[in-house]
Each structure stands twice: as structure tokens, then as C-alpha cells.
Amino acid sequence: MSAGHALTTRCVIAGGGPAGMVCGYLLARAGIEVVVLEKHADFFRDFRGDTVHPSTLQVFTELGLIDEFLALPHQEVRHLHMDIGAERFTIGDFTHLPTHCKFIALMPQWDLLDFVARKASAFPHFSLRMQTKATSLIEENGELRGLRAQTPEGELEIRADLVIGADGRHSTIRERAGFVPEEFGSPIDVIWFRLPLNASDPTEPVARLAAGRFLVMLYRGDYWQCAFVVPKDGFARIEREGIAALRARLASIAGFAADRVNTIRSFADVSLLTVTVDRLTQWAKPGLLCIGDAAHAMSPVGGVGINLAVQDAVATANLLWKTLKRGRPTLEELNGVQARREFPTRLTQEAQVLIQNRVVAPTLAGEGELKPPLAVKLLDWFPLLRRLPARLVGIGVRPEHVSKELLRQGR
């Protein structure tokens, strides 16, 4: 690898999120020269997905990293509860999953990414370049041969046998490649904010539903990270009504935390997530592969976004590391990643869209007393049934495992 404003590597990954970092780690572990680009100066971004599911924890277990990972500050969720009106229902039980970790770990995403970056840096073939944003692709004779990126020192040209676009739902790589995702629509957006923690508070996540209101509260050790679900484009109306009206809405649904909503002093204290559900029909072209949110933006329903991204990364490394050892993957090999991951992605998105349209949207549109659905009552009445939603959320469809041959490469 050469220094300066031009370099050559085997694989360059645009995007230092969960998909990009885990894929970079795995390829470097296999002895492949890989450069990961992250456009920010650090990984610290508040109000990102923080739920690390048992499927992802299983990957860390297979890599021999689980003890170090769980030594980081985190909270462990073994049951999912839902408050509907004044009633509480248990709707998920992770304690029977066939995984090493039978819980969801709540951990700030920046801690996860810092951890993976630190472990990857031990491999001589790994390079992480912060404050480096991919801006365009290098195309020659109809094939991609690398990318150009902007750095604080100017433009950097990186030539590579493979470009991986893992730069999120607003992917520059996807756009420059001419990929247009299929949109599936979403009737909701999410307002993120923090509320203070009191010593007497519970520690498991709280999902609270009432007619016209839906609030999720995630325990974060010393505060609550909260998601207030609103109808699509409803935030503009909330802004017109003013911050006092928002606080009143939150107080009506926040239960034990209702007395703390005044800590939200202005709209500067909240962050809007515009929910998008989309998927590429084509994930690859010669010299390029998109994974994670760049290939499929997920709804926040179920909090599975991080974990689908990690599953993509594992599948990519499993399928491509041998070829990358030799040189340039064929288009057929790149399409193999989509063939492997498209079915679980599609099934998960279909379930998310169904829940958005049949459960969340009617709840937000409702008035008067909200009655618990029969499905929720059944989960509460028959504890054995709680294992099914826990498996779907915690493990998902077609979970990926790091290949044993790849694992041996890093020893």
C-alpha cells in the first residue's frame, strides 16, 4: 500500500458502521488488505441503533471476542414487555434461545464500533481512515476499479479489486453506481430524545402504547434513550404546536417518567429519524458490492438494523475472502452475497411493514381507550409462545456464522 494521495489495496469499504467495520475486521483477519473509510472524525453519534441482538453476540462468540466485548458497559435484556394503557404484557423471552448469549445487549453503537476497530487494528492488513468520505467511483472499461474520497488533506484516490458500499441509507456509493432502491413506504417517523434516570426506575426496556401515542424507552445505565413514534411527516405539525405541546404529549404516555419531560427544553434536545424501508434489486456490479443499509434500509421495528448489517458482513466475508486472496471477485461471486442475504432481508422487511401498517399506524390514529390485541394477550397467557417473537427478533431468518476456515486464518 502506497502513501500520499493515491493508494492501492485489495478491498476498500466505504462506511465505518456495523456492516463496514465487521466486514473489514473479518477480511483483515483472513489476511486480505482492506481499507475502511469513515467520513466522521469519530464514531460518536447519538440516537443510533444500540440493540446488539443474540445473533450478533453469537458472531463475537465465534470470533473469541465475547468476553472482552461484554466487559464494556452494557445492559442485558432477557424479556420484552409492552404496556397498553394500564396493563403490562410480556411478549418476548430470550432466555431459551439456542445461542451463547440469551439476551439483547444494550450498548452505545460507538462503543461497539470502537471495539471492532481496536480489534481489527491488530491485523497488519487493516487500515481505518477517519474523516475520509467516498465521493465518486473509478470506472474503466465498464468495471469499477476503486473510488475517490475527500480527506482533510485533499482528494485521495484508492484503487482496489473490490469496492464495498456500506455507507448507510443515504449511500453515496449506491448513488454513484446508479443503483435505485425499491421503496416500500413507512407510515411513521421517530423522535429520539433522552430523559433522566431515577434510582427507583426499572431497568428493562419499556414500550408504552395508548390511543394516539407510542413511546419506547431504553435503559442506558444513567439515562433513558427514548423513541416517540409519530405519523409520517408529523414532526412538522409538532414543531408548529411548540415544545410545550410535545412535552404534554410525552407526559401523557411516559408513565413513571412523566415528571421529567420538562428536561426537554427545546427542539434542539430531540432528533428526528425519518423512517425509510427500501431494498436494492441489484446489490452488485463488476467491482462493487453494497451491503447493510446501503443495500436495504430497515425500519426501527424490532431494532434489527445493526444485526442485519452484521449478518451481511459475515456472509460477504465467508463468500469472498478466498477469491480476494487471489484477486478480483467475479460478478457471479458478488451476486452470491445478494442471493444469500436477500431472502432474510425481504422477509424481515415484510414483517416490519406489516407491523407498521397493521399495528403502529392504527395505534397512532386511534382515539379513546386502546384495547390489547388478541395476539398480545395470547403471548401473556401462554409463556411458551413468547419464545417465537424472541427467536424472530433475537436470531432472525437464516443467521450467519463465521466459517471455520476463515476463523483459522486469524490464529
Image: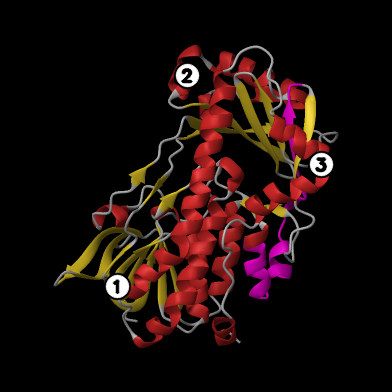
Mark 3 residue type: Phe
Q: Nearest the camera: 115 or 26?
A: 26
Mark 2 residue type: Glu
| Image-quadrant location for residue 321 | bottom left
Residue designated by label 1: 331
Mark 3 or mark 2, earlier in chain:
2
Compared with residue 247, is residue 128 higher up or lower down, i.e. above or below?
below
59 left or right of 184?
right
Question: Pointers 1 and 2 in contact (CB under 8 A)?
Answer: no
Residue designated by label 2: 239
- Cα gap from disc 1 to disc 2, whole angstroms: 48 Å
139 left or right of 231?
left
Mark 2 surroundings within 10 Å by alpha-carbon count, few (fewer than 14), some (14 through 19), many (20 or more): some
Compared with residue 94, is residue 354 higher up or lower down, i.e. above or below?
above
Look at the numbered disc 1 and give the secondary structure of its residue.
helix
Look at the numbered disc 2 and give the secondary structure of its residue.
helix
User: In this picture, which residue range is highlighted in magenta?
Assistant: 56-85
Q: How did the renderer colour the structure? A: secondary structure
Compared with residue 65, is residue 110 higher up or lower down, i.e. above or below?
above
Q: Residue at x 68, y 22 (%)?
A: 253
User: In the image, residue 45 lies at what x, y percent?
Assistant: 52, 47
Mark 1 or mark 3, earlier in chain:
1
Location of the N terminus (image quadrant): bottom left
Residue designated by label 3: 382
Q: Is residue 150 visible?
A: yes
Q: For residue 72: magenta? A: yes
User: In the image, residue 324 lies at what x, y percent?
Assistant: 38, 81
Mark 1 residue type: Leu
- Cα gap from disc 1 to disc 3, whole angstroms: 49 Å
Question: Pointers 1 and 3 in contact (CB under 8 A)?
Answer: no
User: In the image, residue 153 lies at what x, y percent?
Assistant: 30, 62
